[in-house]
Image (tube, grey):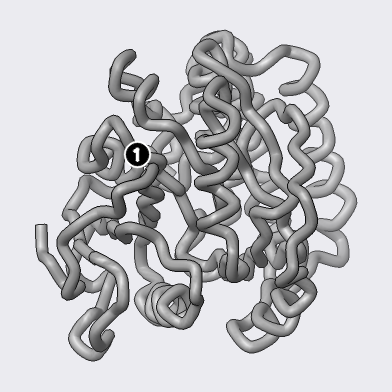
């Protein structure tokens, strides 16, 4: 553990601790940390989970206004998020943010309000004003432009029940997680596609999952540091099948997700987007089906690709 911030005390009310699992994107991470530092609404602590020192180049990060620390972890989103779970006290809220998710001012206060006002809520996810994952992605400047749409006055929050949290911004009540020793499934390796759905459904046995309109942010959808096309294509089949067998995803939902992704990969492979390896994804889809027919399908097989 490497302390970086100047503070070492948590707030007296329900603390909201930001946890960021990051790999291979130190430039993006630095911009996100600086953005958070400029907000009037500060988290009680920020913890990074990295697999190697180069994941977070902090030599010129400067002094941050919130307590800040860095933890080393085995590589992989699930493993790195488990490292964060192990580091956070049971009487707090852990807010998982992607390293390319920019929160609006007031996001932290809105998160705290959800869990203070609704004691049966175990997970809350926010409203994504713009999501670069659906296209080529946004740079930091354009992400901030989208973020200006956030309403600084903030009307009364609208909270609706939802099936799962969105991994780029997903807050959890640590008490049930600690009590039941819940962890992310490391059998979903590397990018760990659908890990947010899996963990959400496990946690849903202990309370409600909601989406809150005042937890607003922008997902840049940065394309660097993500799984190559063939690996992701394989995961698009292997991971839903694994979750069906595990019982954390219904067959109907999983089939819809697989069908949609296969159709998109095939349909767009003739004129693929420059930022998507459609050919690789199709190859990964086909290999996964071949392994399914042979009884060899497993999310961990992407480690062999």
Q: Is residue 123 above or below residue 94?
A: above
Which class describes the residues within 10 Å of circle 1: few (<14), some (14-19), or many (20+)? many
Tell me where residue 290 appears, x and y as whole percent: 62, 24
Q: Residue at x 20, y 73 (%)?
A: 5
Residue 57 image offset from top left, x and y in percent: 25, 79
Q: Position of residue 201 (x, y in %)?
A: 57, 20
Which quadrant of the structure image shows residue 66? bottom left
Give the residue number, with chain letter if any, for mark 1.
Answer: 92
- Whether residue 76 is visible to the viewer of this picture, yes or no, is no
Q: Quadrant of residue 144?
A: bottom right
Q: Quadrant of the N terminus?
A: bottom left
User: Compared with residue 185, is residue 97 higher up or lower down, i.e. above or below?
Assistant: below
Residue drawn at the location 47% of the way across and 23% of the way down? 298
Is 49 on the left-hand or right-hand side of 9? Answer: right
**Residue shown at 45% from the left, 48% from the top:** 95
Please report the residue visible at 82 percent of the width from the left and 31 percent of the height from the top.
259
> Going by the image, does 255 lie left or right of 43?
right
Element assignment for label 1: loop
């Amino acid at each position: 553990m490497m302390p970086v911030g100047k503070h070492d005390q948590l707030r007296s009310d329900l603390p909201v601790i930001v946890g960021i699992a990051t790999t291979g994107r130190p430039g993006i991470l630095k911009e996100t940390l600086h953005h958070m530092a400029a907000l009037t609404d500060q988290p009680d602590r920020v913890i990074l989970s990295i697999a190697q020192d180069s994941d977070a180049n902090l030599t010129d990060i400067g002094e941050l206004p919130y307590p800040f620390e860095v933890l080393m972890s085995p590589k992989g989103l699930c493993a790195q998020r488990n490292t964060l779970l192990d580091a956070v006290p049971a009487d707090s809220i852990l807010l998982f943010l992607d390293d390319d998710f920019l929160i609006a001012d007031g996001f932290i206060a809105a998160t705290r309000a959800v869990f203070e006002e609704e004691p049966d809520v175990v997970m809350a996810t926010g409203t994504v004003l713009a999501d670069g994952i659906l296209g080529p992605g946004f740079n930091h400047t354009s992400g901030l432009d989208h973020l200006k749409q956030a309403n600084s006055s903030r009307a009364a929050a609208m909270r609706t029940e939802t099936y799962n949290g969105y991994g780029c911004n997903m807050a959890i009540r640590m008490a049930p997680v600690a009590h039941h020793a819940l962890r992310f499934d490391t059998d979903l390796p590397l990018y760990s596609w659908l890990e947010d759905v899996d963990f959400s459904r496990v946690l849903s046995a202990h309370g409600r999952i909601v989406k809150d309109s005042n937890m607003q942010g922008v997902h840049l959808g940065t394309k660097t540091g993500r799984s190559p096309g063939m690996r992701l294509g394989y995961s698009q089949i292997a991971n839903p099948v694994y979750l069906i067998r595990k019982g954390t995803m219904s067959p109907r939902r999983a089939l819809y997700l697989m069908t949609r992704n296969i159709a998109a990969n095939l349909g767009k492979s003739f004129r693929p987007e420059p930022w998507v390896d459609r050919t690789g994804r199709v190859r990964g889809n086909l290999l996964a089906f071949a392994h399914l027919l042979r009884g060899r399908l497993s999310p961990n097989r992407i480690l062999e690709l």
